[in-house]
Image (cartoon, helix red, strand yellow):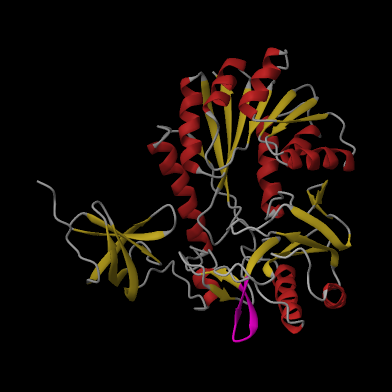
């Protein structure tokens, strides 16, 4: 007989939270039935409104806290806090770090059956606020003025926001200033329902080490009204701006950037450094949003690779060459592979920029290119993987097992797919030696992880 659900939609119930989900919601149980409530913390008691019930679990909204956790910190109840994607900002930073570290341990044990592996304490930030070097915000209209900020969850309603607490001050200022200038010039916002209007998004990118700013105006139309006045005002009010770019996206789509991009003023790229490696960043480049912690992560990858200058290294999923160029400083030769052709163009340009000549980049899927290299006799002493959230392709994992590199350094942004892939590599003859979590995105639930595996 199926068990009845002990609560109904719109019920008000008093609960005690006992855990957090992987996306930071509090978990309470009513007669063994879990209810997930954003904002709840373990140990807290609260009144909750049930907003949805499924067969195995329900969702609730926090109505009133009856007992507070000593890990809770008071945050100003602004829209930026509510909708800005900072799921953990109400938790003290030490507790955030502990939560992420525990999450990594639990997932490795549960999915990877790696309960005894050495997990080091997570590496956090000295200042866990104002770290993001890029923002792209949707633009709308309200009471005849332009607004820009975040979408309310599960809607396309824009919440006007003056600042985000995880973006660099220069990014916040750039977005605000461009919004105000466009409003002054009467440039209309894009209207999604009617597919009318001009301005869809404003993007800003900032080189933290160089102080260079890029502004990208994304429109539905091929032309920007009062373009020259717009450029003049941006240059006058944002002294750090080095590049103003126009991107045209004329399609009915949720994708932010369109296919046509042209420079309106200044340079096509801005520059930044991670450690002593210089990177050229265009409007479309993938570049890490937190270079400070990226260096911490890459230093760890380099340490795990243990290069002496004699090794051949393969970097699967190399992107614009960030890890490859770090490794090339200590390796004999590095081969990087990436499926996005523009990223490989950026990687080659970055290698040239830094006069690093012992790297070679190829366009293609790692699971196709690396087996081809292997057949051609390009064997790797060290293989580095930094895959997207879905983890490594199964073919690539099988190729690694066949190639038998002495070391595999696995960089991951998703503990669950990491644990799954580590299990496959363990069963294929590798031993997981140590795991280093890094807090790349404070105030959010995301965590980066660097893992060293050795051939058994």
Q: Quadrant of residue 38?
A: bottom left
- Please say if 376 is above or below 207: above
Residue 272 visible in the snapshot = yes
Q: Quadrant of residue 395?
A: top right
Residue placed furthest toward the bottom: 143
Q: Is residue 57 left or right of residue 404?
A: left
Give 197 or 441, whichever is nearer the viewer: 197
Q: Is residue 331 left or right of residue 66?
A: right
Give 5 or 128, whichever is nearer the viewer: 5
User: Which range is magenta?
Assistant: 139-148
Q: Is residue 300 left or right of residue 19?
A: right
Residue that appears at 69% across and 20% down: 381
Q: Position of residue 191 (x, y in %)?
A: 60, 71
- Please say if 183 is above or below 97: below
The verdict on residue 339 being magenta is: no
Q: Position of residue 355 (x, y in %)?
A: 90, 38
Q: Position of residue 107 (x, y in %)?
A: 42, 41
Residue that appears at 75% across and 22% down: 311
- Please say if 451 is above or below 211: above
Residue that appears at 58% across and 15% down: 402
Residue 321 visible in the snapshot = no
Secondary structure mainly formed by the magenta segment:
strand
């Amino acid at each position: 007989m199926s068990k009845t659900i002990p609560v109904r939609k719109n019920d008000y119930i008093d609960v005690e939270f006992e855990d957090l989900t992987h996306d930071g919601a509090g978990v309470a149980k009513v007669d063994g039935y879990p209810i997930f409530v954003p904002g709840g913390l373990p140990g807290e008691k609260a009144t909750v409104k049930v907003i949805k019930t499924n067969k195995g679990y329900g969702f609730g909204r926090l109505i009133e806290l009856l007992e507070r956790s000593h890990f809770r910190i008071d945050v100003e109840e602004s829209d930026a806090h509510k909708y800005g994607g900072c799921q953990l900002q109400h938790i003290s930073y030490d507790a955030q770090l502990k939560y992420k570290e525990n999450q990594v341990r639990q997932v490795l044990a549960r999915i990877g059956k790696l309960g005894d592996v050495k997990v080091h304490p997570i590496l956090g930030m000295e200042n866990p606020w104002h770290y993001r070097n890029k923002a792209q915000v949707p633009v709308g209209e309200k009471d005849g003025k332009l607004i820009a900020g975040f979408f309310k969850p599960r809607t396309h309603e824009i919440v006007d926001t003056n600042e985000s607490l995880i973006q660099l001050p220069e990014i916040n200022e750039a977005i605000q200033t461009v919004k105000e200038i466009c409003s002054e010039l009467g440039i209309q916002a894009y209207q999604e329902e009617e597919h009318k209007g001009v301005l869809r998004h404003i993007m800003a990118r900032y080189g933290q080490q160089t102080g260079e700013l890029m502004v990208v105006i994304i429109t539905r139309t091929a032309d920007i009204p009062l373009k020259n006045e717009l450029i003049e005002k941006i240059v006058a009010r944002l002294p750090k701006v080095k590049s103003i770019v126009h991107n045209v996206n004329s399609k009915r789509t949720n994708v932010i950037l369109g296919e046509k991009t042209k420079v309106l003023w200044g340079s096509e790229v801005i520059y930044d450094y991670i450690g002593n490696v210089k990177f050229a960043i265009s409007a479309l480049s993938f570049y890490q949003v937190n270079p400070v912690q990226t260096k911490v992560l890459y230093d760890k990858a380099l340490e795990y690779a243990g290069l002496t200058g004699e090794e051949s290294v393969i970097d699967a999923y190399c992107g614009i060459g960030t890890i490859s160029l770090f490794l090339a400083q200590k390796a004999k030769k590095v081969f990087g592979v990436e499926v996005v052709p523009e990223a490989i163009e950026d990687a080659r340009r970055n290698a040239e920029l830094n006069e690093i000549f012992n790297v070679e980049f190829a366009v293609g899927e790692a699971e196709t290119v690396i087996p081809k290299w292997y057949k051609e006799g390009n064997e790797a002493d060290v293989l580095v993987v930094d895959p997207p959230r879905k983890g490594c392709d199964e073919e690539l994992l099988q190729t690694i097992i066949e190639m038998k590199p002495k070391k595999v350094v696995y960089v991951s942004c998703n503990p669950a797919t990491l644990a799954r892939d580590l299990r496959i590599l363990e069963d294929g003859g590798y031993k997981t030696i140590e795991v280093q979590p890094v807090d790349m995105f404070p105030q959010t639930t995301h965590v980066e992880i660097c893992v060293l595996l050795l051939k058994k």
